[in-house]
Image (spheres, helix red, strand yellow):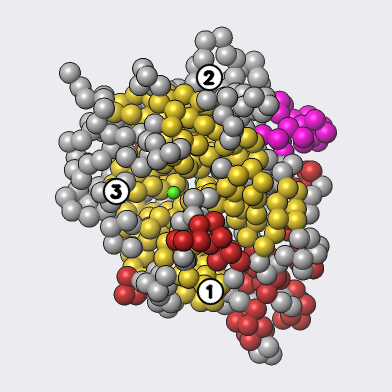
Amino acid sequence: LFGFKTNKVSGYFEPIAPSKEDALLLPKGFKYDVVAAFDDVINKAGEKFGQGSDYNAYFPIHDSNTRGLLVNNHEYTNIFSIGPIAADGAWSKEQIEKDLYYQGMSVIEVFRDMDGSWKMDTGSQYARRINGFSPFELTGPAKGTAAVGHATAVKGTFANCSGGVTLWNTVLSCEENFSETAERAGLPLTHYGWVVEIDPFDGKYARKHTALGRFNHENTAMGLTKDGRVVVYMGDDKKDACVYKFVSKGKYDPMKDRANSALLEEGTLYVANLKSGKWAPVTYEAVSKLLANEKFKAPTGVKGTREELLAKFKNEGDVVTNCHEAALIVGGTPTDRPEDIEISPFDNTVFVSHTNNDTHGNIHGHITRIFESGDDLGATEFDFEIFIAGGRQSGFSSPDNLAFDSNGNLWIVTDISSSSHNKGVYKTFMNNGLFVVPTHGPGMAQALQFASAPVESELTGPYFTPDENTLFLSIQHPGEMTDDLSKPTSLWPHRPGDKIARCGVVAIQGFKLG
Ligand code: FEO
Ligand code: CA
Ligand code: CA
Ligand code: CA
């Protein structure tokens, strides 16, 4: 076993070529185990692993690199869980319930067995599902306000895309494209689109932090300011949406453990203005000051007259709930679908994936690198550059999730939408993949392909164990273009006798050759 610790990406593995194969392809010497797949039983209660596997986070048990809890996000369902949709587009009650059940999150216990393979331990005392039926407590400025129908607690989480870990060992999970599920189930839209926090080791702990704003949340990336406050970078995955960061009011105290979570209840939410290089506060104070000017004109992307906006934004709760519009009003720059964000462990620079945006002809996307003023994540000024652009030269298109290894190599997965696979401008890229890009030193900004995904799937949620000997990775929506269950377009993970494709999580390890 030689793990993923390397400061020399080139020569460490033999890059693979793009492929159309219905398989997870890895370089020579690397192998994977499927630790959990859609509908697998995860615990003694018989709860089932969800669908649309996305973000992963590994929490060691007793500091172990070979036994821990794995938290996995479940973003959306498809034909393999809910079956075909009726010709008139209507969903049955059963389909709506399955939709709520199979989205959300799974906490599973995983271990590396004597034979060197990773497995799920279904006898785990921690394994559980969190889904569209689980109760959540609201925190922050929108809690109990008119914007959320005066709710202080809400039902369920869904559309859980990417996420992040906190400094106090909990998981933040991001509600992204929540509106369809909420509308179908007759749930209030403003109860979704938040960042949720769960504690993998404590099933009673579940919160939605409204101070982090409500939008199409992709991810969180947490760091500290030079004076010890908590910073959370977040992407809003929508065409022409903005990049955000939240800075807590109070300071992080490692002695306080999970009580540090209160830091996510009070602070300042900022939006990036890429023209001025400034982080603009998205606050009621800032919004109301601009609306007070009789000459106020709503920027592109914000609907309504000044009077209508004055009626919409009456307090801080209204601002965080209608965050995208508030951000545009205070000068946030619309960008090309900001997805995952990671802070470099090397130099505190911040990397933002911009998947693509066909309305601007940005077909293959790019990764932006933000340099905070004075390398302080709490700075209110920054500059930035395009670190690497998708296209033939880099070899990838449509970057999405990011993960750093400890040597500052950026691991990038791609999200070319399944309807575009092997067509037109996306043809040469074939199936989605996983790429590695050094962010400093030799080979900087040169991408090497490490994995190729099964048919009509997306690789998501790359996450290393602390010793970097294992890489967890989700295989999301294989065969999702299937419209007839008797003719699935993928059968990954190709379990003997299986007739459907299953999303799932794999553990990847490298073994010395020869
Ligand atoms: Fe769920 Fe933005 O990918
Ligand atoms: Ca994503
Ligand atoms: Ca990430
Ligand atoms: Ca995506």
* Mark with earlier residue (2, 3): 3
In screen coordinates, is 472 left or right of 136? left
In this orientation, does residue 371 appear? yes
* Mark with earlier residue (3, 1): 1
Q: Position of residue 265 (x, y in %)?
A: 61, 66
Q: Where residue 491 is drawn, which disc sits there?
A: 2
Could you tell me how many numbered marks the image carries?
3
Q: Position of residue 247 (x, y in %)?
A: 50, 70
Q: Is residue 100 above or below residue 309?
A: above
Say what amino acid the circle numbered 1 marks.
Answer: Lys
Q: Which of 59/409 is in front?
A: 59
Q: Where residue 249 is drawn, which disc sits there?
A: 1
Q: Which of 373/205 is in front?
A: 205
Q: Are marks 3 and 1 in contact (CB under 8 Å)?
A: no
Q: Quadrant of the N terminus?
A: top left
Q: Where residue 406 is drawn, which disc sits there?
A: 3
Q: Nearer the viewer, mark 3 or mark 1?
A: 1
Identified at 78% across, 60% down, the residue is 151
